Image: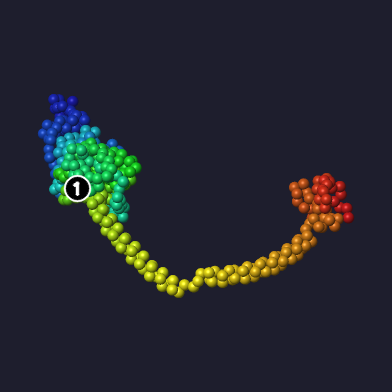
Amino acid sequence: MQLPLGLSALTTLLTVSQLNQRVRDVLDTGLDECWVVGELSNFRVPPSGHFYFSLKDMRSQIAAVMFRSANQLLAFRPEDGMEVIVRGRVGVYEVRGDLQLYVEAMEPRGVGGLQLALEQLKKRLAAEGLFAETRKRSLPFLPRAVGIVTALNGAAIHDLLVVLRARMPSLRIVVRPVRVQGKEAPPDIVQAISEVCRVPEVDVLIVGRGGGSLEDLWAFNDERVARAIAASRVPVVSAVGHEIDVTIADLVADRRAPTPTAAAAMVVPDHRELVAWLERLTVGLRTGVLRQITRQRERLGTHARHLRDPRQVLKALQLRVDELSERALRAMTTRVRSARQQLRGGAERLQALSPLAVLERGYSIARAADGTVIRDADSLKIGDPLRLTFAHGAAAVRVEDPDVT
């Protein structure tokens, strides 16, 4: 028997699955890890959470997948058109025989992942209006209590307490210690803001920490922290880092302080300045009152010289009151007499029109069982019940012959 295609008896035949498996094994051996640079296209995220996309350059492209377990570690959101550097391995998807790049790590080319994530979040929150000046609230002039959300072991809390105590020794301060960096920092800060806002006396809140690198300050660039600041019951002052460090928290907060020290000076006035201000007001008030008293005394002296004897004025007023009283009494008497005549005439006319007066003249009113007044005998039938109303009393009757004339 001759074998087709010139195959010998020793030739090993492979199924498609076996062929794809051999290709996969070769790729796993030769390209178990590689670094690839390219442009993202056809990026999509199904409900599974995996990233599916193509990586391309000017001449070629390759399908790629980044499973959810790996992409959850990304600080930025990949988008079509973004140039990235990825680390992964090349394999074959055996079901379809497709060549595919399995990505395990990804970085944007030319800019760090954290910086890109920061810019993406800024753009999204700005589009929602969270940075708008119209939603920023004014700080209270003299808060009953100041809330502080920061770490207890940093320089920020020391600077805040020193300045607040110096400016307003009697001020109540509510401190909620938090982690200010690391994965656990954002949810801790969010919870702290909520807890401090539930203290009724707290009228303003300071959220902050000392300076540091972008990675150190990243908790204050977290979307959850930004939304917690925006939802705060009281105005929030962000005091994160130094003046050159601008975080998302700074942009969302009602006020931004370049340092914790500046934040403390921003939320409460200096009691020494208040005392000096009150003293200036007291002196000004005393001077104004004395000047007003002098002016009123001069006016009183002028009026006293032109003032008539009040007893003469009172007598003239009494005479005028008596005259007006008599005129009013005469007018009222005439008005009452006229009203009585009008009322009597109206009563007589009403009496003439009253149906009771008609009944007094010997007439009666016939009503059907439903109370309808019978005006036409043609509407009656033999046996219909009627109720007759007389001038005095009423009687129930039945119709025997509606045609009687």
Q: In the image, what residue occupies the spot 17% across and 50% down?
A: 243
* Disc 1: which residue: 261
Residue 319 picture quarter: bottom right
Q: In the image, what residue occupies the spot 86% across and 49% down?
A: 401
The extreme bottom residue here reads 306
The one nearer the camera, 29 or 352, is 352
- In the rendered structure, the answer to whether residue 195 lies left or right of residue 352 reads left
Q: What element carries label 1?
A: helix
- In the rendered structure, the answer to whether residue 70 lies left or right of residue 191 reads left
Q: In the image, what residue occupies the spot 56% across and 70% down?
A: 315
**Which scheme is used to colour this image of the protein?**
rainbow
Task: Give x and y (percent) for residue 282.
Answer: 30, 58
Q: In this view, does 303 lie above or below 376?
A: below
Q: Is residue 217 visible?
A: no
Q: In this view, does 174 lie above or below 315?
A: above
The one nearer the camera, 138 or 269, is 269
Quadrant holding the N terminus? top left
Task: Give x and y (percent) for residue 184.
Answer: 23, 36
Task: Give x and y (percent) for residue 223.
Answer: 26, 44
The one nearer the camera, 155 or 131, is 155
The extreme left residue here reads 30
Residue 324 picture quarter: bottom right
- Total marks placed: 1
Local crowd at mark 1 within 10 Å, few (<14), some, or many (≥20)?
some
Q: Can residue 34 be seen in this view?
A: yes
Q: Is residue 132 above or below residue 42?
A: below
Q: What residue type is labelled 1?
A: Thr
Task: Give x and y (percent) for residue 50.
Answer: 25, 38
Quadrant holding the C terminus? bottom right
The one nearer the camera, 136 or 378, is 136
